[in-house]
Image: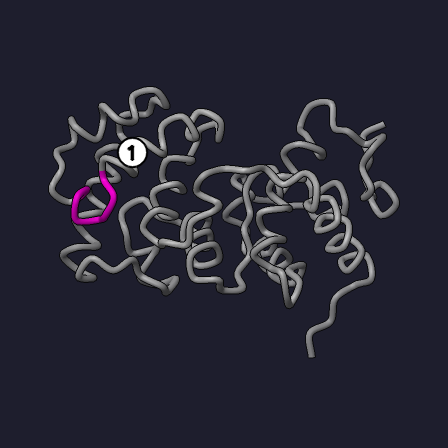
Amino acid sequence: MRRVSQETYRMQKIVLDWAKHNLRKYSWRIVSDPYKILISELLLQKTDAKKVEQVYPNFIKKFPTIFDLYQADIEEIQRFIKDIGLFYRAQRIKRIAEQIVEKFNGSIPDSKKELTSLYGVGDYVSNAVLCFAFKKRVPIVDTNVIRLYDRVFNLKSSKSRPQTDKKIWDFAEKALPLERYVEYNYAILDFASSVCRARVPLCNICEAKVICRNPVL
């Protein structure tokens, strides 16, 4: 039987209530096409979402399907993502397109094993695609979410790269509501980055302060 603490239930409610009026609106959040969602996640890696929003619509317009991307050359891809930097990203996107067309007949994989077999795709991107494109109940963990769980639940990691810590991913999975988990994943990402900020967190207006074990005073 799945056991969830009262604090976790309260956190779910706090985050979902906050999301009703504060969830960020991005163009990749209103699509269901797995290809378009995968592309958004690849563009978002190590990049501010506002910058990606300026590039993403034109990128999708130019490469509306995985087959269009498969036929493109790396230089052409680079031209469309130059404003967000990290030019190695174009090579990664091109290689992933080749793998999907040649190994999966152009269909975006819907399993963790197959997604993580793609070049440069790890737990975060694979789970984001599984959740946001295929509506599967899997957790989303980034550095902001890790910081939030550390502060609110005193969840510590001894690893130099906490985002690879199985303990944190397991906790995040248990923290997911049984329903509305897609909305919760979007909400926890936004809540962690805009309220439980690394610098100058908004503790004074944070509804989670009633359960937070490590508030920044």
**In this rendering, is residue 9 above or below 66?**
below
Element carrying mark 1? helix
- Name the side, left or right, on which 155 lies relative to 71: right
**In this rendering, is residue 168 above or below 48?**
below
Q: Nearer the viewer, residue 83 or 58?
A: 58
> From where the camera sits, is residue 149 visible?
no
Where is residue 50? Give x, y as percent. Answer: 49, 27
Residue appearing at x 30%, y 38% in the figure: 60
Image quadrant holding the C terminus, namely: top right
Residue appearing at x 54%, y 42% in the figure: 142
Amino acid found under the numbered disc labelled 1 = Phe
Where is residue 143? Give x, y as percent. Answer: 57, 38
Where is residue 64? Give x, y as percent. Answer: 25, 43
> From where the camera sits, is residue 70 visible?
yes
Q: Which residue is mark 1?
A: 59
Mark 1 surroundings: few (<14), some (14-19) or many (≥20) residues within 10 A: some
Image quadrant holding the N terminus, namely: bottom right
Q: Quadrant of residue 88?
A: top left
Q: Nearer the viewer, residue 106 or 119?
A: 106
- Name the side, left or right, on which 69 lies relative to 130: left
Q: Nearer the viewer, residue 107 or 85?
A: 107
Colour logic? one colour
Where is residue 116? Give x, y as percent. Answer: 34, 55
Tell me the magenta residue range. Answer: 63-69
Magenta-span inclusion, residue 59: no
- Name the side, left or right, on which 74 lies relative to 160: left
Residue appearing at x 41%, y 35% in the figure: 45
Q: Quadrant of residue 189?
A: top right
- Name the side, left or right, on which 213 lies relative to 17: right
